[in-house]
Image: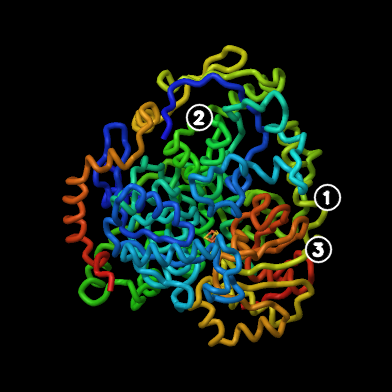
Amino acid sequence: MEKFTTLTAVAAPMDRPNIDTDQLLPARFLRRPRDEGFGDVLFIDQRFDDDGNPRPDFVLNQAPYKEARIIVGDRNFGGGSSREGAPWALLDYGFRCIIASSFGDIFYNNSLKNGLLPIRLPEDAVKAIRAQLHENPGTTITVDLDAQTVVAPDGSTHSFDIEPFRKQSLLKGLDDIGMTLEHESEIETFEKGFQQRRPWLFANA
Amino acid sequence: MSGKTLFEKIWNDHAVHTTEDGYTLLYIGRHLAHDGSGHAFGFLEKRGLKVRRPELTFATPDHGVPTTSHKVEDITDPVQRRAVETLTKNAANHNVTLFDLGDRRQGIVHVVGPEQGITLPGLVMVCGDSHTSTHGALGALAFGIGASDVYHVLATQTTWQRKPYAMRVSINGDRPFGVTAKDIILSVIAEVGANGAARHVVEYAGDTICSLSIEERLTVCNMSIEAGARAGLVAPDDTTFAYLEGRPYAPKGKHWEMALDHWRALPSDADATFGREVTLDATTFAPMLTWGTSPEDALPITGSVPDPANESDPVRREALQATLDYIGLEPGTKLEDVPVDQVFIGSCTNSRIEDLRAAAVVARQGKAKVPAMISPGSSLVKHQAEEEGLDEVFRKAGFEWRESGCSMCVGMNGDLVAAGKRCASTSNRNFPGRQGKGARTHLMSPAMAAAAALTGRFTDVRTYAEKA
Ligand code: SF4
């Protein structure tokens, strides 16, 4: 996955709560191979009308947000399904960071594993930042992962939490497997003990 | 030291390694795969890795399978056909147990796991599907993961997870007549919100929950994810053990006795503490349905569509108006006055035999006024329903009796709700576009969905149901 260190980019405000994974990537595109990309189908039913023309009222279709690489959402962004196509679609479209007051847990985990940084900020902060974006469409936000800060358009700095484990893999662009294989002998030892303690699980007749 | 919760006991039992900052490498006791697992197997092969413990993975096609026929050659959509065929191939190549199309054990992965006794108490169980929370009904810690994590599980039989927080939802009291497991969980979600349980594992407790059958507990745990929870679970008890005994993959003989000893020690200790506690009174519950586009938008059938004018916050008002625009309802409309275009009874939430029996009680009392379709949760459920003559009841009432699969819950197999059409559905998600582009979904119990089929509008099932 691509590293994440710092990012200064245009941010698009999305005011509605519960932007679920079915909206991010409708189920009919789930079977696409990963290397075909998902950027063209992100939010497809909201971005385009029935004839395939862009809907002017959808935020990402508006001129100031053409270059957006950050979304500032609301509550429960990415709630719903476990489809990894949701973060893939956001990434392939060009987003690297989503700021919201809360996330769907599986979406949050999936994002981290693909180099898309999900940032939880308090509800008031998220609301205030969105208001600033509405006031000045096309304005930028700066995210510094190492410092764990978001600098809003009004210059205010907001700190965010991220587990050191995830932060490191994002900063270095590492996936989990490499690290897990370092624990190979531990897994083996555990497995032997587990098999003795819970033999019925391994008696797959 | 205070006692441990059920969730903590399972977690600790599967912890291979914990980093200084609290990330745990968890061993996976059971992994379930389906026709959406193609990405993960693909990543595995690309990296030249093997499935580490093939005997711990079980697979069945469900998401994209047709419900008009279970012959692979009848799958007209080449993309879905390839997905089903790929699963067959992957299972064969990697020695994974498969209940394929045509096998009676095929079905929705979350129906098949419990039915086959693959799901067991005390397990950490994962699947590349968010409704893996279903399996918690048997006292397993079961949660959904994405394709990268599925790949990781296939390769290493482990997953890295941050320990979620513990939450308990206690529900006590006798549920009023007409209130089903679906109404219980919709009431919980309406109370805590669609993301109210985020980063938590919810243990459902209290005498109402203890009195539920396993199938009812499966319905409750299934929709834990709709409250944002990482997982939902119920302490295993004699109901659980009676359900599991004799199932094909449940332990036998000496192993059964060993397993029972372990399982009986699993329930949360009396002095265990939960970071959050929610208590609900089941005597206040009523048959529910959703009016909006989030599962938290649930109200009793006697309620009315909310009015954005009553929202003081302008952003919220606009969001509510957008919801009503999508769902095509006017503020203040009585839910019982809303006409429906079609009915779907199925999905991993409500497609087991008890669900079909409940729907049949209503279906016996009339004829469907709108198209209604039933997709049993597994081919075994379908078979059992046919033995009980339920298929005849439904056919006589004008319902369509289909093969098993995810079907109209997600529409990947082509069972779609057309744009602007309103569907009374027993599934779990009413998100915009979930059942098809522009589809309007209303979640409710099987009995309520059947009642809506008979009247052509949302209907209080209490006017139909037989008093017990
Ligand atoms: S029935 Fe619906 S919710 Fe359940 S696994 Fe299938 S698509 Fe997912």
Name which quarter of the figure residue B161 lies in. top left
Label placed on residue A119: 2
Residue, disc 1: B330
Note whether B406 is above or below A28 in the view shown: below
- Residue B174 seen in the figure: no
Residue B117 or A67: which is nearer the viewer? A67
Chain bearing tag 1 is: B
Label placed on residue B339: 3
Chain bearing tag 2 is: A
Q: Quadrant of the C terminus of chain B?
A: bottom right
As drawn, is B419 to the left or to the right of A171? right
Chain bearing tag 3 is: B
Q: Nearer the viewer's eye, disc 2 or disc 3?
A: 2
Mark 3 neighbour class, 10 Å CA radius: few under 14, some 14 to 19, many 20 or more? some
As drawn, is B151 to the left or to the right of B176? left
Residue A123 or B278: which is nearer the viewer? A123
Task: Tell me, yes or no, whether dots 1 and 3 are on the same chain.
Answer: yes
Task: Tell me, yes or no, whether dots 2 and 1 are on the same chain.
Answer: no
Residue drawn at the location 56% of the way across and 32% of the way down = A94
Give the amino acid at mark 2: Ile
Residue B31 spot, x, y in % from top left: 36, 59
Verify CB contact (< 8 Å) between mark 2 and mark 1.
no
CA–CA distance in space, label 2 to label 3: 42 Å
